[in-house]
Each structure stands twice: as C-alpha cells, then as structure tokens.
Amino acid sequence: MRRPSTSPEPTASDPTRHGSDDIASGAGVSYWADIGGPVHYADFGGPPRAPLIVCVHGLAGSAANWSALAPLLTRQYRLLAPDLAGHGLTRSARRGTDVQSNRQLLHRFIEHVSAAPVILMGNSMGGMISVLEASAAADRVAGLILVDPALPFVPARPDLLVATMFVAGGLPGLGPALLRGVQLLSPEAIVTSTLSLCCHDPSRVPADAVARHIALARHRAHFPEAAHDMGIATRSVIATAGPGGHSYRASIATLRCPVLLLHGERDRLVPVSAARAAAQSHPSWSLIVLPEVGHVPQLEAPRACADAILGWLDGPGRAAAQKASPAPPAPSAPSLIRRLLPARRSRAGARRRRSSDRGLPGNSS
C-alpha cells in the first residue's frame, strides 16, 4: 500500500489544528491528504501487506463511526476511513457535499492511498457512495461490505419521526433551518439524539466511542457552513434513493464484485425490507440480518458485525480479499545480485567437479 501523504493540515486559525486529530479519528492515527483541499482520514492500522478496507461513513457521520469496529478487523486487514467533504473534520472548502461529489472525492482518495483495488465498507450514505464507486470504477473496487446502506426506497410502513425528518430535510428552506437549530444543542445532546435515532439500544455503544463523537461535535460547532453543507447532502441522498433515482438503481444492477449486505433488523432509517428486496434481486449477494440492532451495527454491535465480516471475507468474499491484496514488491538490484550469485557459484562448482572427474584414474577411455 502507498504510504499516505500527511499534508496539508488545516491552517493555524482552524480549531481542528491542535489536539483534535486523535479524537476525531477514534482508535486510529490522523492524516491529512490534499484532494482538491484538505481531507482528514484515520489510519486504523493492520498488517502492511494485508488487503485494504476503506471505510465510508454515512450522512452526518465521520471516521469516528468506525472506531469500535476497526480494532476487531486489523489483525488481518488494513483499514482507512476518510471524512467526506462537509463531514467530520473535512470542511467543504468550495467542494460539493452531494452524493456524486463525494463519490468523486472517494475515488481520488482510493487512488491516493492504494495502487491495488480496495474493499469498500460503507454505512448508510457511505454504502450508497460505495455502490456508485464500484459501478463507476469496477477495476478499483475488489468487493463491497454494505452496512445498512441507503438503498432505493421500497414500499414500507414508515417510522413517523424518520419520515418527518426526511421530508423536512428535503425542503431547501426548512432543512438547513432545522440543522442550524440542531447546532444550538450541546454536543452531548446532539450525540445522544443521533444515537437514539440510529441505534435500537444506544446503551450498547462503547463509552469511548460516544466520547469521541461528543468531542467531534464540539469541534464541528465552530464550522459555520456545517448546516448548509449537511442540507445539500441530505437532499442529495433523498433524491438518489427516491423514485427519481434511476441512475442509482442502474448502478446497483451493474455490480459484479462480491457483495456482503449486513443490516440491522431494527433499522428505523432504512427498513430491513429494503435490504431483503435488494438481496432477492441479486442472488449472488450475501445477506446477514443482525437481530435487535439498528442503523449503525458497527457502533451498536461491533463484535457481531466483525464476526459477520470476517466470516464473509474467509468464505464468499475470499475473492475480494485476494484481489485487494497488494502485489509483492519488486526485488531490488542488490537482492537480485544476492539471489543470482549462489546460482552462479553452484554452476561454477559443478563445472569444476566435472573437470576433476574427467582427470581421475579410470575415467579415461
């Protein structure tokens, strides 16, 4: 894997410059890449020559969303998690925050960190963006792990609160106003309300992961553009998954890589019926439904999530893991010389022995 660039960092006037990187990345190490502007990402580690999994968070999420799950996977795999534009510590900086703009940012990020194909693991909007990337750049994506992805809408009895939020968020005037209102809440209240919506049992989320999300919410309170950026992203997700999102449906139909569809049975935002419908339409996909789990299994049930992922990568998804393994490095000139010298010495020794044998008594004709 390519060693990621660590520049540029935010400017000295940016409140994220000092002391926030480790908090924002969770259990990983923070880096900044220059991809049309600063992009923050977390390197969760893993064996240097292991297959690379790039983790793509959902709407209003960040790299910290993977902090509970990542340590359970890094014995066998390398994990990187970018903050998409307008999310986490990656400010939009005149970049788009809609689905397609962040798909293009993800593509450039993959090119930045890896010469080999990668496995994309996406949650919610991140699953949608991962699907679009796998369709648009099939040679760069070895496999997909879709964790409660934002899927095309299917007929289902809607959750009243979720339906109200999506309708309001989809209105250009009302959506940003509501998001600005959310920003007036304390960081603790923002994280508590988000986990209550996304989890079936928020008490199962590890305390250290909750603390990281609160710290990140405190930093994002300094971003005046956050509500505007989030409004654009929200409307884009709704438009992409809704009845008019024909290109998204077409992209799903073109997927040829191995796919694991991992879905919480109690997901209020994307009903499990949508996952079952997608799996029924694509028999080659592997569907695993986690009982009593909501929209973010990687936070609410990280062990069950990890077991499902590792089992799939060792079984139906093995081809994806093999394809995402970096090619062995080409031997350097000194190592080639060291490798050739023993062979030359061996051949020279054989010639000397043959010459000696011809000179022994009894060997002449």
Image: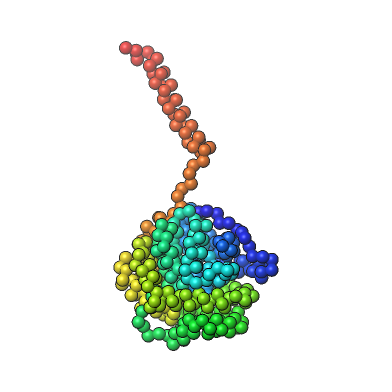
Report the front residue among 164 and 36.
Answer: 36
Q: How many marks?
A: 0
Give the answer, above or below, for where 269 lies relative to 356: below
Question: Which residue does the image show at 34% across and 67% down from the upper left?
Answer: 253
Residue 56, given in percent of the width and then of the height, sits at 48, 67
Picture coordinates of residue 38, whole percent (x, y):
59, 64
- Relative height, residue 291 to residue 343 (above, below): below
- Asked which quadrant contains residue 22, the reply is bottom right
In the rendered image of this protein, does residue 38 appear above or below residue 48? below
Residue closer to the observer: 139 or 177: 177
Whether residue 165 sits left or right of residue 277 in the image: it is right
Query: Residue 88 lies in what quarter of the image?
Result: bottom right
Q: Is residue 66 left or right of residue 310?
A: right
Residue 310: percent from left, percent from top: 42, 63
Q: Assign the C terminus to one quadrant of the image.
A: top left
Rendered location of residue 170, percent (x, y): 48, 81
- Toward the right, the furthest residue is 12
In front: 364, or 44? 44
- Which residue corresponds to the image point at 36% horizontal and 69% vertical from the top-left? 250
Q: Is residue 272 above or below residue 321?
A: below
Residue in the picture at 41% in, 25% down: 350
Question: Depth check: 278 or 105 in front?
Answer: 105
